[in-house]
Amino acid sequence: MNQAAIKEQGLSAHTGTAPVAQPGNLLLFARVVSPHHPDVLAAFRRRSPADSAVRYSAPPGSHAAPPARLQRVNPVVRRKASRGLTHAGLRAPATRHPFPTHPQEKVLLCSPVLVIAFAFLLILAACSPSSDNGNAKKVTLHLFTWSDYTEETVVKEFERRFGIHVMTDTFGSNEELLAKLQGGASGYDVVVPSDYMVSIMIKQGLLAELDRSKVPNLAQVYAHLKGLYYDPQNTYSIPYLWGTTGIGYNAEMVSSPPQSWQALWDERYKGKISLLNDEREVFSMALRSAGESLNTVDLVKLEAAKVRLMAQKPLVKAYTSENYDQLLISGEVALAHGWSGTIVRAAAEKPSIKYVIPQEGGTIWQDNLCILKTSAHKHEAMAFVNFLLEPQMAAQITTKVKYASANEAARVLLPKEIAQNPAIYPSQDTVARLEWIKDVGETIKAYDRAWTELKVK
Ligand code: N2P
């Protein structure tokens, strides 16, 4: 099943992580398979309707509800379960009653239906590839990262070398990442928050302390990208990819290259402008365009930025963080507020597309590899983090996604047009005009209100 199909079905993992030939799994399959038979279904329904479904068991120590995407049990999972595969991470919860003890249900245990079902399962267990190749304990890591941020061949190489399966889900903003985790999506192992979101997640106790002895490739990260304000000792975060926020434009559609953020208020481009669907980024753009810090906690300045964004709204075709490269390529927009790498990728497809950081300056950001405190596979997660920072792998990732790698050793391995592209690796002068987004503390509530108002009105 491909990723799109998996996503579409609301599933994120269903590779054989649990062998059938273990008592716990026999129990699980007894519950999974038996509901297909009406007699058995009826018997189980007497116990509890929910008992006949495969359910998510949260990683130890997690109080959160199962992630919505893991709660659904669809026919594919059931089919896989009946073949001896389970939803990754599923275990028969220890607190469940092992076998029916009700007298009526003892009858069921002896019923020919169940005897046949068990015999069938035992045969399946014996024939299962997982019991042949010693793959029985194959772990599945769940990666939650930005869309268009993964290089499939690198992930496949990790899977091949380590025998660990990786499932990827994507998000479009730091706020979406946080909201999903706060909403109980505790099935993830590795997440990729930006700078300011790392500090928020540390504060909220979401991140695991890293065992840096397991991430020796941290030594290859540029010194100036380590120990940044959001995690001064890199206790919780390993720098991964970094970039800037600016304007992508189609030189064939604009009269002259935009110099200022004001271009995004130019009536001539009404309906041909897209903005990131990203609260902090949009306010950063509005604040910097007025010469203010993008981390202002001054409510008057914030309100003024909101008023300007409201006035701009009729010109905006879309607030999107996920397909503005396509909008630029198709000519549906002439100007896109966006992230460096995504625009460089669009430019590779259509050379009239260019990237500029306006004179007022904008955002510099760094995305980081972090492991969730709730991860049940921290050891494997650490191996994955270290692997992504191997110079060869890091170079491959940057070549594909067009965002700068935090790994210094990777740069010399890059094709010249990437290593020397100032839109990917900006000069020191450009960097000097940029500002990091920071946690604005309680003022975020005012930002949230202003953002909601902008989006709904
Ligand atoms: C690319 C995401 C860029 C990450 N789709 C911005 N922090």
Image (cartoon, grey):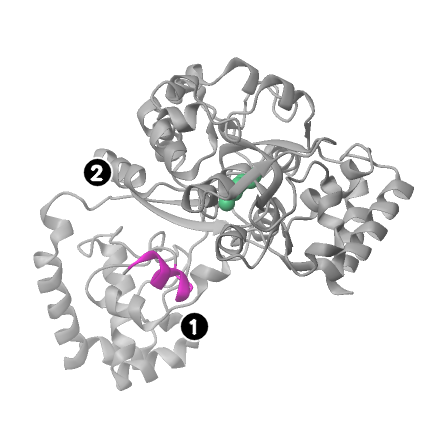
Seen at 12% across and 56% down, the residue is 128
Q: x%, y% of residue 387?
A: 34, 28
The image's mark for residue 338 is none
Circle 1: residue type: Ala
Q: Quadrant of residue 412?
A: top left
Q: Which residues are magenta?
A: 2-11
Q: Is residue 193 above or below residue 46?
A: above
Residue 170 in magenta? no
Q: Is residue 218 above or below residue 61?
A: above
Residue 5 in magenta? yes
Distance (Cα) linking label 1 and label 2: 37 Å
Secondary-structure class at tag 2: helix
Q: Is residue 60 visible?
A: no
First-in-chain label (1 vs 2): 1
Residue designated by label 1: 50
Residue count near mark 2 (Cα–Cα under 10 Å), binned few <14, some 14–19, many ≥20 = few
Residue designated by label 2: 160
In the image, 288: left or right of 396?
A: right
Residue count near mark 1 (Cα–Cα under 10 Å), binned few <14, some 14–19, many ≥20 = few
Q: x%, y% of residue 153?
A: 28, 40
Q: Point out the image quarter for the N terminus.
A: bottom left
Seen at 41% across and 34% down, the residue is 378
In the image, 12: left or right of 272?
A: left
Q: x%, y% of residue 255?
A: 65, 46
Pointer 1 residue Cβ closer than 8 Å to ligand 1: no
Secondary-structure class at tag 1: helix
Q: x%, y% of residue 380?
A: 34, 34
